[in-house]
Amino acid sequence: MENDVQRWDKKYRQAALAPILQIDPLLESHVVLPTGQKKALDLAAGTCHTSVYLAKQGFDATALDCSAVGLALGQKLAKREGVKIKIHEMDLDRVMLPTGPWAIISCFRYLNRALFLSMIEALAPGGLLFVKTFNAHHLVKAPAFNPEYVLQPGELASAFSMLEMIALSDGDNSNETSSWIVARRPSG
Ligand SMILES: C[S@@+](CC[C@H](N)C(=O)[O-])C[C@H]1O[C@@H](n2cnc3c(N)ncnc32)[C@H](O)[C@@H]1O
């Protein structure tokens, strides 16, 4: 893990502040403005584009990542975009998720299967989960990519079967090199 942190810190040290906010279309399609619960958690947030977007929508957004350098860049992004976000430097291989309940949990381009159950449990009733990352088809174009970190066909539907499915692309299409799910924790 030490090496991972160093690798990501190095990458982010070389990165400039992005000129525009990069928002995954899944968020734009499915995020609804907060009514009750406002807490949103972005896992492996990198430079915090998702957290900043969620803060702009009115959420109380927390960005969590093991790279302090990425998070610091995220704070600059938040300042430029005129919002506040909380940051948490944290190794997700070692610790539990911060206490919820969370109205939104997002996890883009990071795969840690050991967190799946905690993600479900940390969601508020009615809360939304967003997960999107590379799937097995990615290995065709990127054979050097670590196969442990790609989703298998059907894996998201199975892992999150206790949630209400809102949108799902789960590796059926070989042209699609990412899988994703948007799902809601039942209210009752
Ligand atoms: C490909 S980036 C994705 C960043 C962001 N979610 C996005 O889509 O732009 C993967 C992120 O996972 C973070 N990461 C990797 N291992 C981690 C760990 N064990 N705990 C917390 N963050 C980790 C890295 O620092 C990096 O920011």
Image (cartoon, rainbow, N blue to C red):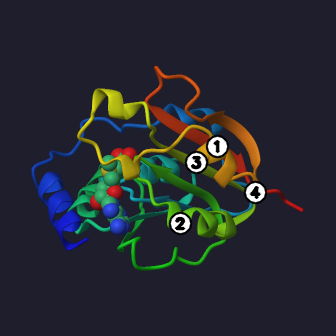
How many numbered marks appear?
4
Residue located beneath label 2 in the image: 115
x and y percent of residue 15 in the render? 15, 47
Mark 3 to mark 4 CA distance (whole Å): 12 Å
Residue located beneath label 1 in the image: 182
Between circles 2 and 4, the one closer to the viewer is: 2
- Name the kind of residue labelled 2 in the image: Leu
Asked whether the beta carbons under mark 3 and mark 2 sit within 8 Å of each other, the answer is no
37 up-or-down from 130: above or below = below
Residue at 61% over, 70% down: 118
Give whichever of discs 3 and 4 has the lower sequence position. 3
162 up-or-down from 141: above or below = below
- Residue lying at the far right of the rendered structure: 188
Asked whether the beta carbons under mark 3 and mark 1 sit within 8 Å of each other, the answer is yes
- Name the kind of residue labelled 3 in the image: Phe
Mark 2 to mark 4 CA distance (whole Å): 16 Å
Camera-side residue of 89 and 77: 89
